Amino acid sequence: MNKKEISEIKKIFTPANCSLTRICSCYVDAEKNKRAELKEAFLSLPEEEAFKYFKIFRSGLSGAVAKNLINLELPKKWKLNAPDDLLLDLRDSRLKDDALIDKFYDKVIESYDYGENYYIVLVHGIYDVPGKAQDGAVMEDASDYVYDFVQCAICPVKLSKGALSYNTDKNAVESRKRDWIVEAPDVGFLYPAFNDRQTDIYGTLFYAKKPDMDYKKLITEVIGSYMPLAAHHQEFAFRKLTEELLRENCSFEAVKGIYEDVMQMVEESAGEPEVIDLNRAMKLFESNGAIQEELEEFDDIDPEQFPVLVAENVINTKVFSIKTEGLDIKVKPEYTSRVECRMIDGRPCIVMAVSDHLEVNGISTRPIGVLTE
């Protein structure tokens, strides 16, 4: 799912556009015991409660795509031969099958590694997808397709901080009672995915407030997919791949060229995740100095086993960093063309073209002398 599709679904979680049919929830304590459950029609909730649930589910669709919001794929055989089609069955039951819901809770409790109290919330919705005209304009009164879905949010429940408060009945300031507060989701998912504004039963949109946490067991056991590399792990994997493929050709210019090529991918992606698959990675390295002999070593890699790498995750898009002994230079991406590595007086040097105006320790100066090879 891309940002536009996610934004379209988020609009469902408002009073004006609400198409939610049923909500189920389970409060779990730190010892993994089910303490309280809720099962009822969503529209029967008091208005104030409904607003708070809207906020929870919108939060579960927030953040950056490919970082906080990760598109997971389910293997095609999942629907055909898997003994347990739990998510699909939950969706099809519209959360009215108590045995299925309890089974889902048990799977979450078993696989979600969280040592404190938390709240599992499930909601079912039916969205009449508006049609679009040829010019892309949405036609609200022209819906011929229904998106039937469930969304789950798992929220930490924490004790509020102690404080003094004013008691209007007693006209006195006194210690406020501490309550157990349901916080914004830590993790969750939307199933099925709303890809190309259509139902995709082989896709799930997974949400993680802290994308660097390990949710492998939850994703494997509950969703039936695999855990992709976290954003910072993608950067590390890409770095190691660069060193392995370029080897002796891993020069300053080669690495700068790769950085600039990936930055171009990010800029041309218009804010959507730009995936670097195996074939694209090989072309990227080949054009920046990797020799054919080194590239051939990767011919046996199964493209489907190649880690999912997103252009925005494999480099620092805010700064081009150069480090050497005693120096830590940071250059804005748009100025990398002004940075070179040259031999001067027999020594490798970083050379940076500067303008007529130069500040040193905040003092305006002017460049003096010209560096020559």
Image (cartoon, grey):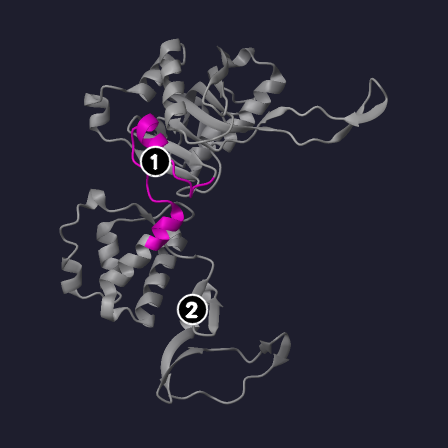
Which residue bears the numbered disc 1? 216
45, 229: nearer the viewer: 229
Q: How many marks?
A: 2
Find residue 339 and report its image quarter. Answer: bottom left
Q: Which residue is mark 2?
A: 322
The answer to which quarter of the image holds residue 288 is bottom left
Closest to the camera, between mark 2 and mark 1, is 1
Under mark 1, the amino acid is Lys
Residue at 34% of width from left, 60% of height from top?
A: 261
Q: Residue furthest front?
A: 31
Please name whichever residue, 100 or 114, is drawn nearer the observer in this view of the structure: 114
Relative height, residue 255 to residue 342 (above, below): above
360 on left or right of 262? right
Residue that lies at the very extreme toward the right in this rendered image: 171
Is residue 184 one of those drawn in magenta? no
Q: Is residue 23 above or below residue 203?
A: above
Crowd rating for badge 2 (residues with CA inside 10 Å; few <14, some 14–19, many 20+): few
Looking at the picture, how far across and down is residue 77, in whole percent?
20, 27
As for residue 228 lying within the magenta part, the answer is yes
Q: Position of residue 65 (x, y in %)?
A: 42, 41
Residue occupying image coordinates x 33% and y 66% = 255
Secondary structure at badge 2 equals: strand
Q: Residue at x 63, y 74 (%)?
A: 362
Q: Position of residue 185 (x, y in %)?
A: 50, 31
Answer with mark 2 or mark 1, whichever residue precedes in sequence. Answer: 1
